[in-house]
Image (cartoon, coloured by chain):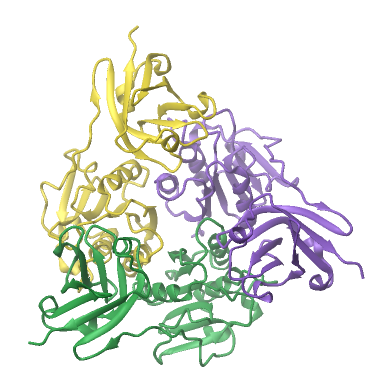
Chain colours: A green, B yellow, C purple
Amino acid sequence: MIRRQRIVAILSDFGTADSYVAEMKGVMLCINPLLSIVDLTHEVHPGDIRQAAFVLWRSYRCFPSDTVFLCVVDPGVGTARRVVAVSRGDRLFVGPDNGIFTMIVDSDDFRCHEITRPDFRIEPSSRTFQGRDIMAPACAYLSLGVAPTELGPEVVKPVRLKLSAPKIGARQIAGEVISIDRFGNAITNIPAQNMQADNLTSSTTVYLRQRKVGPIMSTYSQVGRGKPVAYVGSCGLLELAINQGSLSRTLRVARGTKVKVEFHGD
Amino acid sequence: MIRRQRIVAILSDFGTADSYVAEMKGVMLCINPLLSIVDLTHEVHPGDIRQAAFVLWRSYRCFPSDTVFLCVVDPGVGTARRVVAVSRGDRLFVGPDNGIFTMIVDSDDFRCHEITRPDFRIEPSSRTFQGRDIMAPACAYLSLGVAPTELGPEVVKPVRLKLSAPKIGARQIAGEVISIDRFGNAITNIPAQNMQADNLTSSTTVYLRQRKVGPIMSTYSQVGRGKPVAYVGSCGLLELAINQGSLSRTLRVARGTKVKVEFHGD
Amino acid sequence: MIRRQRIVAILSDFGTADSYVAEMKGVMLCINPLLSIVDLTHEVHPGDIRQAAFVLWRSYRCFPSDTVFLCVVDPGVGTARRVVAVSRGDRLFVGPDNGIFTMIVDSDDFRCHEITRPDFRIEPSSRTFQGRDIMAPACAYLSLGVAPTELGPEVVKPVRLKLSAPKIGARQIAGEVISIDRFGNAITNIPAQNMQADNLTSSTTVYLRQRKVGPIMSTYSQVGRGKPVAYVGSCGLLELAINQGSLSRTLRVARGTKVKVEFHGD
């Protein structure tokens, strides 16, 4: 029987100028030559676990439900930090246990195993490139049907980052910018489900720091060219942008910049 | 019977630092897990429809004749601009109807359909990321054999950009630079077929602005290192470069810089 | 019988903003639509054959043993330099004969053939983009089982670069930095096998220029944050880094910077 191959999606901070990502791909293809490989991104800022956790969270649900995610943002490589495989439903996530999977292990329906079994790695393993020598082989074996339980002992409490949560009140939500994209758009930590009014456009006002941006619109072009606009973005979070421009450059917005939504009474 | 899978080639201005491109790939792989995906480029300058149209034009003919092209340079996302599927021969092109397909719909042998049918999109669709929620699913369904006519009503006059055409005279052609590549080489809008002399090298003189570059050569190294050179480039257009250097940096050449070819009488 | 498809891994200095890499992929997929394509990197500095040779050397062994490598760093394109196919075991390497394969042809177990047969190229071939018109088609045909001997005459002495070799003495090794990676880590030309002492940590001292870095450690975190560290890297060469920082930026290290290892007597 011909089974379609599982997909491995890769997230890293390796960039694409060096051959690190390619070496991980080569190692996986040696173990499972029919593997289908997709890049999430390799341009996470070096060592930025928080950014990696966000990118993984916003993208993983777009992939087939049995995808294996290889996540290598690993500033503690070679230290005592564990290498783990997290399973949630049919999805599998392999990477360092440093908080990168915080938003994956945020409910009770996950299992986590440390990857310790020497049969599923390259020996001798490098102490400085375990993405290639331990994590990539583990992904390839998982893609072939090896169960996560075979890789090593269960980890009950994987490492979680403390994420900034928005403060949700009756009349306002106070949050902050958690990501800036290529277009200079600012993604906040304020989820759309906290703003389910009948008519957001007439019933809300969004503030960037102390600056009034306006009500929540449904797309960029509802404000004039060069004007700031707030809207519910494509990952279900409140975003701010400048129509046809760069909010982050024009208004010097960065991760941590404060954003507030006010609801108006009827 | 095992059919080979169709290829989807993707062109965007999303860059590769964010996960936008990966999300489109994930969505397509959910619909057609056997799809073969190739990146054209994702580094089109944000919102630069003209550059996107050029990159698509120069590259699409290199691909198998039944390739599906997903083209997402879409500054008007969420506005009334249409999302369309253009077919030309077996090739299919999906993207916003904003002029990105100008050089594809430049003859009469195309058909264009608006993508309106809700069955072939992700619902609810984001108003700010229709590349993922409308265009990517459409590509995946097309790759499975859905006919473009099933996606929505025919569009008779898709949007076309006004492109700068070279002025072709008996003794000279006046054109301009339309693209600069990584090496600093300048690609002009002057097609090789307008220069079919027996011996271009002895019968032409190329000018960059007022500066005499010399006759048309056949490759860089026919001039000394560091010297400017004109030649017919790999997409059939007149190009200018500096042998082993960067023309755009050295001589401050950009899109719009004037170029002239003079033909000498016998 | 269903055979798994061969992999083509691509190395170039084309960057990813232009469509050059995509055009090579399209050409290969026209010839072998089932081909599996992996990028090594496309960000080799324009024309930097030495860097390309290093990246190829460090990554090729990670790939399946019948991989075809398409290597296009080709500042002499269109000149009399040959285009060649090098075979070593089942691995095949296609590119310009300009030294890019120096570390592949460093022993006697290779064969090299010039690619001259017009049947295996695109005609007419561009004089400025032979990566697309000659090398890519050759790779695709090789992936289908065409023998390198069919492509053209044997080349007995392919071009080799003069690589800087470390000076290995009884009590010290003097070498230099040959590559800087994204993290600012410096990779030297000093191989680990020249340092097989029982206990490198107690028996060696590494110097960067005149500056004492310390003994050889096994990973970054064995020194304090912000401190320089020497270790055997993931490609088997001595490397220097700053724990959680950038050595190249902090200490202005570049290719050619001198590194010395001293061995202490017992």
Name the one closer to the observer, B216 or B244: B244
Q: Residue at x 33, y 68 (%)?
A: A253
Q: Quadrant of the N terminus of chain B?
A: bottom left
| Position in image of residue B195 (x %, y %) | 33, 21
- Residue C159 relative to residue C200: left or right: left
How many numbered circles are shown?
A: 0
Q: Residue at x 42, y 44 (%)?
A: C20
| Position in image of residue A255 (x %, y %) | 38, 72
- Residue B138 relative to residue C245: left or right: left
Q: Residue at x 27, y 15 (%)?
A: B171
Asked where in the image residue A233 lies, by quadrant, the reply is: bottom left
Q: Residue at x 54, y 86 (%)?
A: A113
- Residue A263 relative to residue B229: left or right: left
Q: Quadrant of the C terminus of chain B?
A: top left
Q: Residue furthest right?
A: C266
Asked where in the image residue A170 lies, by quadrant, the reply is: bottom left
Name the one closer to the observer, C264 or C195: C264
